Amino acid sequence: MLSELTANAVADSLARREVRSLDEVERAALARPAALDALEALRPAARVKVIAEIKRSSPSRGALASIADPAALARSYELGGASAISVLTEGRRFGGSLADLEAVRAAVALPVLRKDFIATPYQVLEARAAGADLVLLIVAALDDATLRELYELVVELGMTALVETHSAEELDRAAALGAKLIGVNARDLSSFELDRDLFGRLADRFPHDAVRVAESAVLSAADVAHYRAAGADVVLVGEALVTGDPISNLRAFLAV
């Protein structure tokens, strides 16, 4: 599944490149105001922090919410106390777009993450051109050379990479990059099975200076408490926010 999602995302980016060249996207990326400091926004604090996600659907759960106005939802997340906003821009299986990201960027003052299946420099430049402050890099989808190339481009553009892992070996690869924002996804993107205890088993392998992000399997305040007790600095939450009251749910999560 992960290979298919990544291949499709790259194919869609190649189609966009036929309309908007690499040079044009690079100029737009460099013309953007400086990216917001996501590491400062997400640094460890006395309470857990939340990256709130704009997510219409997923391969594992199907349709979740129509989200006709992603900017309005993003403003609700900001009002509810989110520290950053994740925008799924993959179109085929998640129903997102770069237009969603641009709308969110214009609506809020929080750091914005482009969450997609990024495998080429063009996609990283697209992210910055659309106003992203963070870019998701999934270790399982990338070989070491590509992972480092993309990580270094993200840093060069002034953004922050959220480096996503799902095993001890992948977490070690993220640490070898020097990544400062590392996530453990409870959902295996090859099989889409969930393991809520994976974060806790890997928590000791994080570099001491990295911000630790728990991803997936967050549906309630009890789930947030579970991750917090295991050492998470940040939780990334999507489904629970788009299918319920975003402000009240966020405040309940942040009260943990």
Image (cartoon, rainbow, N blue to C red):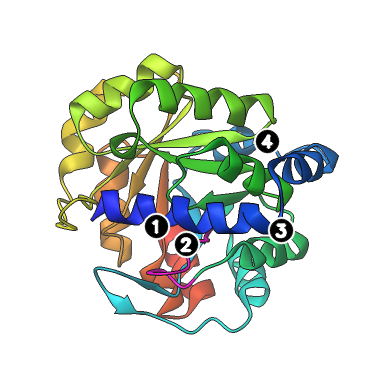
Mark positioned earlier in the residue sequence (2 or 4): 4
Front label number (3 vs 4): 3
Residue that carries the numbered disc 4 in the rendered image: 37
Q: Distance between the residues labelled 3 and 4?
A: 14 Å
Q: How crowded is mark 1: few (under 14 residues within 10 Å), some or many (20 or more)?
A: some
* Residue type pointed to by label 4: Asp
Front label number (3 vs 1): 1
Q: Look at the picture and state if 91 lies above or below 236.
A: below
| Residue 149 on the magenta segment | no
Secondary structure beneath disc 3?
helix
Residue that carries the numbered disc 2 in the rendered image: 90
- Residue nearest the observer in this picture, 22 or 202: 22
Mark positioned earlier in the residue sequence (2 or 1): 1
Front label number (2 vs 4): 2
Magenta residues, as a range?
87-95
Residue 105 tag number: 3
Q: Residue at x 35, y 33 (%)?
A: 142
* Residue type pointed to by label 3: Arg
Q: Residue at x 54, y 52 (%)?
A: 14
Mark positioned earlier in the residue sequence (3 or 4): 4
Q: Do the residues labelled 3 and 1 touch (CB within 8 Å)?
A: no
Front label number (2 vs 1): 1
* Residue type pointed to by label 2: Glu
Identify the main secondary structure in magenta: loop
Mark positioned earlier in the residue sequence (2 or 3): 2
Q: Residue at x 85, y 41 (%)?
A: 31
Q: How far apart are marks 3 and 1 (CA)?
A: 25 Å
Quarter the N terminus occupies: bottom left
